[in-house]
Amino acid sequence: MTQTATSYAAIYLAPHLDDAALSCGGQIARRTRAGERILIVTVMAGDPPTDVENDYIRSLHARWDLERDAAAQRRAEDSAACRILGADHLHWPIADCIYRLDPATGRPIYVSDDDIFGDVHPAEQPLVAEIADLLRSLPAAGQIYAPLTIGHHVDHLLVTEAAQQAFGGDHLFYEDYPYAQQPGKLTAVIGDPPDGWAPTVFALDAADLQAKIESILAFRSQLSTFFTDRADLERQVKGYAAQVGGERVWEKIKRAGTGA
């Protein structure tokens, strides 16, 4: 379903066309079954420039088994996943980081795993403002969820920085899964014990977890990135849910007198 309402109980900001299902699929399914309207906004869902190609892109397309029209096929996967979760969706036209070019040189900016899990390139700072403007155009929502940026993927960093600009910190953060289950990744962001962060856990029943698993399976092209097969997916998803009690989101505690 595309956006059908002028207001939502919650909007989930997904950098990529699987992040909401991976990180929040259980809670989204739970909420929509309870009658809440939920919108998933995928920010980096656009088509790549027609002339961009390199060894890194070719290797990823080969892993995904998507040699042609990869972005369009991934959008179709997301539409199927959102139907499983009962959520509306929006796909914005910004391309995934692997396709984006440096406006000064015309060359791809991110051409390796080290690049995409490194720092945001200085040439991308105008993109933050562009995303923030798009975020301000969203329909009204009771809650906005952005990535906590566990894993330090550049697209997650960009979306969350833009959310800070657009909403002034008046939003919540979801744990970027599956990076959140990797030792040390969560504490690298929030500290141990958490410094200035308060958690909320969405308890998930069997139906919630099943909907999450089925929605992740809808992203056929992405499964090999994180999972060996369906059994491995189910084991990992259920294992992390048992570890945290469901799905966990975080709120940044505003300190009195600081505005932060």
Image: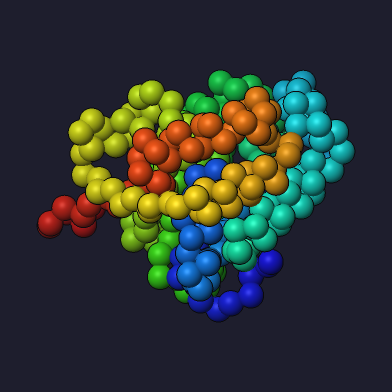
Identify the residue at horizontal 35%, vertical 24% (top origin). Answer: 184
Identify the residue at horizontal 36%, vertical 35% (top origin). Answer: 243
Residue 249 visible (yes or no): no
Task: Specify the farthest residue to the front.
Answer: 206
Q: Image check: 260 left or right of 177? A: left
Task: Specify the farthest residue to the left.
Answer: 257
Q: Image check: 190 left or right of 227? A: left
Horizontal and vertical percent position of residue 187 = 31, 30
Identify the residue at horizontal 63%, vertical 37% (top origin). Answer: 97
Rendered image quadrant of residue 90: bottom right
Horizontal and vertical percent position of residue 128 = 51, 49
Query: Could you tell me how many numbered marks the image carries?
Result: 0
Asked if 61 appears above or below 260 in the picture, the reply is above
Q: Nearer the viewer, residue 50 or 67?
A: 67
Identify the residue at horizontal 60%, vertical 58% (top origin). Answer: 85
Q: Image check: 166 left or right of 20? A: left
Rendering colour mode:
rainbow
Horizontal and vertical percent position of residue 227 = 62, 28
Horizontal and vertical percent position of residue 6 = 55, 78
